[in-house]
Amino acid sequence: MTYAPYKTVEVSTVRSTLTPCIFDDDPAERDSLTALISDMGYEPVCTSDPEEALHLIRLGRCRLVLASIRLDVQDPYEFLARALRCDPGIHLILMAAEYTLEAALEAIRRGAADFLPKPLDHLRLKRTLDDVASLYDQRRRVRALEEQLLKDLEFHGIIGKSPAMLEVFDFARKVARHYTNVLLVGPTGAGKELVARAVHQISPVAQQRLAVCNCSALVDTLLESQLFGHVRGAFTGATDTRPGLFEYANGGTVFLDEVGETSLAMQAKLLRVIQNREIQRVGSPEIKQVNVRLIAATNRDLRAEVLSGRFREDLFYRLSSIQIRIPSLSERLEDIPLLVQFFLKKYNDAYGKNISGLTRRAQTILLQHPWPGNVRELENVISTACITATGDFIDLSDLPEHLQHRSPRLPGDEDWQPLSLEEVRKSHIQKVLQMCNGNRLRAAQILGIGRTSLYRYLKRDGYEGQLRAHSTGAAA
């Protein structure tokens, strides 16, 4: 079959950047289609070998493939499936003489971009090619804008555009101007250390040292030596005199991560540093003056720790005069695309890859995941996926197994906590009573139990006296 030449008035830059691959085992049709697409302003490559076509797809040389298939074979969509495994983002247009509506719909369900009947309609083919070329040009422009946006939204190594993170950035800028102690509160993996480094970098003491100590990683004796230093012979193994982090960062900043894990004895020593600006090396009677800015971080509720007697109240108020709360990743899901782009760039450079992004289904999975490990978990996922991915896009199969087989999240799962059956029963009864405004007869009916049983439960839980006032005016 021969095609009449199709001349275009203007060949755009967009078309020249898209290289279609023509896969057809009929030499005459392949040559005619190559000439036709060339006249439309594109530079196609053609082959009759499916393995060669798949190789071009793996290399990322061709993002658009026109493949001729036969519907009378056992599996007419085998090449389509193999091509999508090589690159889930490929645009693959199938062509067949035995066109049917059912076959076209089945091809599209399996991932084809379009299904064209032979002989090809020149105008429809041109429109299809131009649409794909425009789509890729749009994606290139969006990627360029995202890269610029990434630079504009980066706050000293922290990425975020959500209102919660913009508020953190703004408050950090204000606090950093003043030489004061700061408490960072947030879940593990949310980026508390990054915020601490940012506060130091934009503070008046940015040129001085920043010392970092993870309080949860050391026992009390080692933590005291790490922070305050020691003299020779102070303890077994102290073969020389060493300064601690407070001396090392004198004039600068000390960041104490997980300060809520420290003992009460260590908290008393930290309070002395804050109040008197003085330290004492382990094993030495000499008192040294230091002038440091203290930034502490915790994933605990220190107010609750104070009430339970596990954290000193005076130290809590000293630390929390300025408090910055770092939101969890589940509170800032709109930041995930930016974070993914940031980590892709980081690990593309680290591993020598050129991964462009994630497929739609991979993006959907990331946005639906609750992220208990927060940004640190997301970074680990992208890092691992960059290692395992073989194409230009990270697909579902490149994600960790627990994400691939993730069960649907039910409403309220993000607030779920493991409870005993007794606690569940107690909580449920209270909610039903509140809904019924204290009417115990109505509540018993909804719960499917007798009023006497409800009274017994309330008495056991210690709520009978509390609810008596609500039920005296209710119909019983």
Image (cartoon, helix red, strand yellow):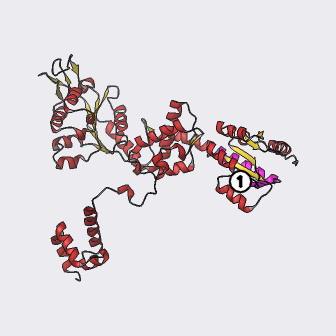
Q: Residue furthest bottom?
A: 475
For residue 424, side relative to residue 52 (left or right): left
Q: Is residue 109 above or below residue 216?
A: below
Disc 1 residue type? Asp
For residue 372, side relative to residue 253 (left or right): right
> Could one spot residue 444 in this view of the protein?
yes
**Residue 123, magenta (yes or no):** yes
Viewer-closest of 31 and 158:
31
For disc 1, the neighbor class at 10 Å (few under 14, some 14 to 19, many from 20) is some
* Residue that appears at 27% across and 76% down: 449
Viewer-closest of 350 and 315:
350
**Residue 214, magenta (yes or no):** no
Residue 146 on image: x %, y %: 54, 42
Question: Residue 423, located in which quarter of the rendered image?
Answer: bottom left
Viewer-closest of 323 and 422:
422
Residue 58 on image: x %, y %: 65, 38
For residue 280, side relative to residue 356 (left or right): left
* Residue that appears at 50% across and 34% down: 347
Viewer-closest of 235 and 50:
50
* Residue that appears at 24% across and 27% down: 226
> Could one spot residue 342 in this view of the protein?
no
Residue 100 on image: x %, y %: 76, 61
The region drawn magenta spans 112-137
| Residue bearing the label numbered 1 | 114
